[in-house]
Image (cartoon, rainbow, N blue to C red):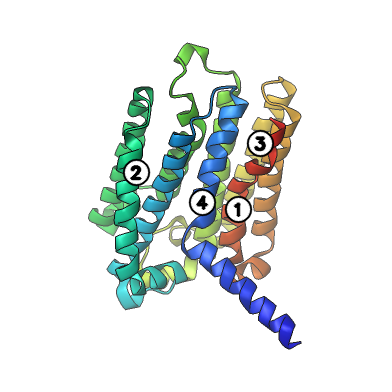
Amino acid sequence: MFVYMKRIKLLIAFLNFINTYSISVALGSFSCYVFFSKIYKVQANYVVASGLALGVWFIYTLDHLLDGIQLKYKATARRHTVHFTKKTVLIPMLAIVGVLLLLLAFYVPQTHYNMVGVLMALTVAHFVVNYLVPVRFKRKFFFKEAFIAFVVSVGFCIAPLAEAPFDLWPHSVPVVSISLLLLNLTNLFIFSFFDKEADHQADVLSLAQLTTDMTIRRLSILCILLSLIFMSIGLWQEDVSVLVWFVFFAMQASLFIIVKNKGYFQLEDRYRFFGDLIYVYPLAALPFL
């Protein structure tokens, strides 16, 4: 029994570490970029993929750190409290990663500069609105979940095509990008749904603060079904392969299971671990593409 309890504690500590420090998101960024590059049959640029992974980690960590500093001891979410208490370690780490990103920029092909510029502009816009615009205005016009879902989709689905002329883009682009956008949106709906109480206590604006639990669950399931429909149409039209369809189906099924089992996934922030883990699924398919 003692050994079992010790293993459980180690597993919980591992899950908390992965969740808190956005490890799955960074790894998922890398795997998704390479995955979509292979789907489109373009050469994957691993410098860009590494820069994307580091950039995503930098943005997520900075976002959590700023939230933690802003909320201070009002913070109730683990990611905010940990980032606030560990700020003396995380700030130098952010500086180091920032320098690495600047160094990587010298090895990124010029054809990617416009795409990088768009992603940076969208990210800066998110931070400006999120931290400088009063909440009473954001409630009226800023749909945070949709904005973030769009930026992530551009980074994962469109960035691999930075070197390809627009008129030569594959026919699969609309199908996979819309399907992924819907999954990103579902993931953010789920996080908002599970974090509702913590966000309310910390006065953090999210969709869950503006609607009911039933509505956000229905929206999540609707997005999952629409994503499945789009991918199935793509499979029927032969724009995507059976393997790609199965990768998306695994992501869709995982999010559906999380939505339908709040009691289980609420514990120890399992919803966040398994929600972010879907972006790592493509890694398993890479050897077969």
Question: At label 2, which amino acid type do we have?
Answer: Leu
Q: Nearer the viewer, residue 61 or 195?
A: 61
Write the residue at 46% across / 45% down. Answer: 53
Residue 15 lies, in percent from the top left, at: 58, 67
**Is disc 3 placed on a helix, strand or loop?**
helix
Can you identify the residue that label 2 sits on? 101
Residue 180 lies, in percent from the top left, at: 57, 38
Write the residue at 58% across / 68% down. Answer: 14
- Closer to the chain start, of discs 1 and 4, is 4
Can you identify the residue that label 1 sits on? 277
- Please state if 229 lies on the left or on the right of 22 as rendered: right
Front: mark 1 or 3:
3
**Placement of 276 over or under 230, stated as above or below:** below
Decide: few, some or many residues near mark 4? Use Cα within 10 Å; few <14, some 14-19, many ≥20: many
Residue 125 lies, in percent from the top left, at: 29, 43
- Please state if 65 lies on the left or on the right of 154 as rendered: left
- Closer to the chain start, of discs 2 and 1, is 2
Residue at mark 1 to residue at mark 3: CA–CA distance: 16 Å
Decide: few, some or many residues near mark 3? Use Cα within 10 Å; few <14, some 14-19, many ≥20: some
Q: Which mark is residue 25?
A: 4
- Please state if 186 lies on the left or on the right of 255 as rendered: left
